[in-house]
Image: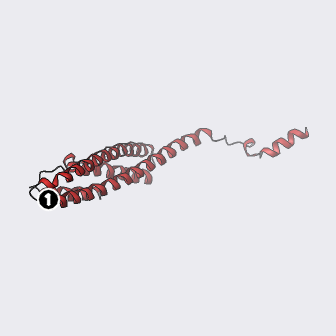
Amino acid sequence: MILALGVFLGSLQYLFYLQRHFFFFTFHTGYPFWGAVFFCSSGTLSVVAGRKPARIWIQNSFGMNFASATIALVGIAFLSINLAVNILSLKSCQSTESPDLCNYMGSVSNGMVSLLLILISLELCITISTIAMLWNANCCTSREEISSPPNSVESRIPPYENNSESMNI
């Protein structure tokens, strides 16, 4: 979705090439493209790590999800700057030769940037949840291996039977 919206935002930029406004800051950074690549690769690695839970896949998925969370934060910053600049640019639309086209372009750009901001915020939540689950899975499997009791007869006796025998003696 983010990639598709980035392509649509880019096509709008070339459609309105006569207007020299800063409505398409996010497209100039290329974020919809490289952000989408990071999100797709972290999702792919998460699926692979879920199907083949080898340590290397889990570590790679954890690292890529961490990178995606960082990229999502960068994207939120870019999109927030884009919205702030769009609001200022919309105020200056009245001084252009075609204020209606400028207002239309600014409104469409604000809508697209707002939708991207919502999608990237959701992606950040998903990525953080995945990081937490991978951390919990990696952390708990190593603890279970270390803290598992030895396989002996004494460990199978319930505690209340041990206490009652020691009290009878």
Residue nearest the observer in this picture, 124 or 21: 21
Q: Residue at 21% of width from left, 46% of height from top? A: 29
User: Which quadrant holds the N terminus?
Assistant: bottom left
Residue 69 drawn at (x, y percent): 37, 45
For this orientation, the residue located farthest to the front is 95
Q: Would you say 155 lies left or right of 93 here?
A: right
Asked if 130 appears above or below 5 in the picture, the reply is: above
The part of the image, by quadrant, that contains residue 93 is: bottom left
Residue 114 drawn at (x, y percent): 30, 56
Q: Residue at 17% of width from left, 51% of height from top? A: 92
SS at badge 1? helix
Residue 90 drawn at (x, y percent): 20, 53
Identified by mark 1, the residue type is Pro
Q: Residue at 29% of width from left, 52% of height from top? A: 36
Q: Residue at 48% of width from left, 43% of height from top? A: 135
Residue 147 shows in the view: yes
Q: Which residue is mark 1?
A: 99
Packing grade of label 1 (10 A; few <14, some 14-19, many >=20) is some
Colouring scheme applied when the structure was drawn: secondary structure
Q: Would you say 130 lies left or right of 156 here?
A: left
Residue nearest the observer in this picture, 21 or 116: 21
Asked if 60 appears above or below 113 in the picture, the reply is: above
User: Which quadrant holds the C terminus?
Assistant: top right
The part of the image, by quadrant, that contains residue 108 is: bottom left
Residue 23 shows in the view: no
